[in-house]
Amino acid sequence: MTRPEPDRIAAARLASGSSALVALLLACAASPACGDDSAAPSDAATPLDAAEADLGTAGDADSDTTRDASASDARLDATPLDAGPEPPVPATIVRNRSLTWDQPSLLDDPERLGLARLMWLVAGDRHGGPLVDRWFRRFATTAHSERLGPQLLLEQLAQSAGVEPSLWDLDALPFRVTGVHNRIDLRSDAHCGEIRVSLASIDPILQPFHLIFLFRQSPLADDRDATGALHCRATARLWASFSELEEDAFTVAARALLDRALRADTFLVVETLEFLISPWEWRQWFLEPNPDSATVATLPFVLENRPLFQTVDSPRLNRPGPERDDFLAWVSANAAELDARRALVPDRFRAPSARVNQGVPWIPLDLSGVSPEVLGRYPRLRQQIEIVGCPACHATDAEFVQTSAERVVSPFYDKELRARGEHLRAIALGAAPAPPFGPLQAEPRLPP
Ligand code: HEC
């Protein structure tokens, strides 16, 4: 598959026009010296580095620093970009320009965003067929959960396209891109947050099945202060500037941003939300070296299910025993931070996957055993722990799915987007507070 070239003519036109920042981005995307992934190493080291990533968020003590010092980013930072005086920050942030894209002209573009393109990137600039084949079958073989649904999609495809995954056209699988999401709110001291691409199965029977691909946003040259610390103001101003572009100029700028941001070496993790067979289930999939010597030559990396970010394993920790005792002691010692949604949940308390039955009342995390004094001081402690995890956030003020196959957002996401608009302006103006884990909106609905 060839990598799409940004529209250089439009880039030149823009350069003389409204937004200097957008023009710089376009020039950057067109220049091999400016973060072009074709020059980035596509050998085994690249996916491995990505596999070591966790979800970086403000306050998350992950080790993104090493990845951000990767060759391509260093090159990007070293490129002198004379942005001139900073453009004013638009007073109005347009949702589907600066926060989440729903335009068919952008989303229905298999060269940039389809499943084949995304799997190509995840596979480290290789055909993604063998990777998707292994991944969808893996749903049925993990020790903690055996889900037979996803591989049915492969069997259906094999009937028309044959059984050899490396020959499949992955865009023949029934997935539709449902959105591109600007997650600059998840910035850390190592990167400028994430850009995410969500897809949904549109098979008449084999759905709901949702995927979301998370990529790190590499800093632009002007995203650092004099000491080298990241503030991400340039990235925020770039996204904000999209709100004021003419339609055509916006489309060109958005495509250039995708070409720059979605790369094999910026891929972090892919998340799934699946209800092919009841109940609903959430998982996270990271690149890991293929442990199978028989297939490693054709498939060096596989997608593997790891414990869910910030998701406390309620069913396990509700059961009496040493694990529960350990958990309650940790909650007691960290109650203030947990109540403020600022504590990182250690791996040992996380669930490898989370499941919720539709139509069944919410099964709460049981905090009895934490001292009455602590529970009295933090009356919403249980809900604050739950809402930073996958199932509570998707099942409170949302019907499990945040962006539907029809590209409609949930009530939760609608409110979240309002908060993200404010937050984007604040970053651009250099006045954004570090957000907590979980929802950005001030008073989110909490689980019952
Ligand atoms: C704070 C609330 C929140 C939490 C916690 C959360 N999500 Fe989401 N999720 C969202 C929102 C909002 C979107 C829309 C895209 C975005 O904003 O990044 C989304 C999108 C998704 C999608 C695409 C389908 C859809 O519903 O739109 C998947 C799949 C997904 N999340 C999986 C997960 C998994 C797995 C976890 C746990 C590791 C998780 N989510 C945790 C709010 C949340």
Image (tube, rainbow, N blue to C red):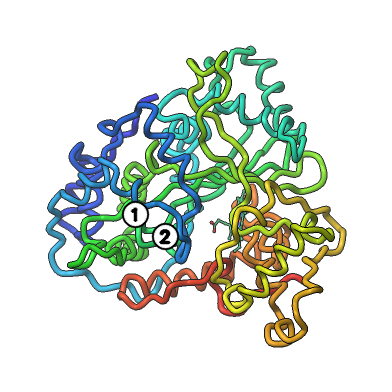
Identify the amino acid type marked 1: Phe
Counting from the top left corner in percent of width and height, residue 326 is at: 71, 63
Q: Quadrant of residue 228?
A: bottom left
Residue, disc 1: 250
Q: Is residue 90 above or below residue 408?
A: below
Q: Residue at x 69, y 66 (%)?
A: 386
Residue, disc 2: 97
Counting from the top left corner in percent of width and height, residue 356 is at: 79, 54
Q: Is residue 243 left or right of residue 136?
A: left
Give the mark nearer the N terminus: 1 vs 2: 2
Q: Residue 384, labelled with which disc?
A: none
Q: Is residue 313 left or right of residue 122?
A: right
Q: Residue at x 69, y 15 (%)?
A: 159
The quarter of the image holding the C terminus is bottom right
Counting from the top left corner in percent of width and height, residue 83 is at: 16, 61
Between residue 442 and residue 25, name the one nearer to us: 442
Farthest front residue in view:
322
State the CA–CA distance, disc 1 to disc 2.
Answer: 8 Å
Q: Is residue 151 above or below residue 314?
A: above
Label 1–label 2 contact, CB within 8 A: yes
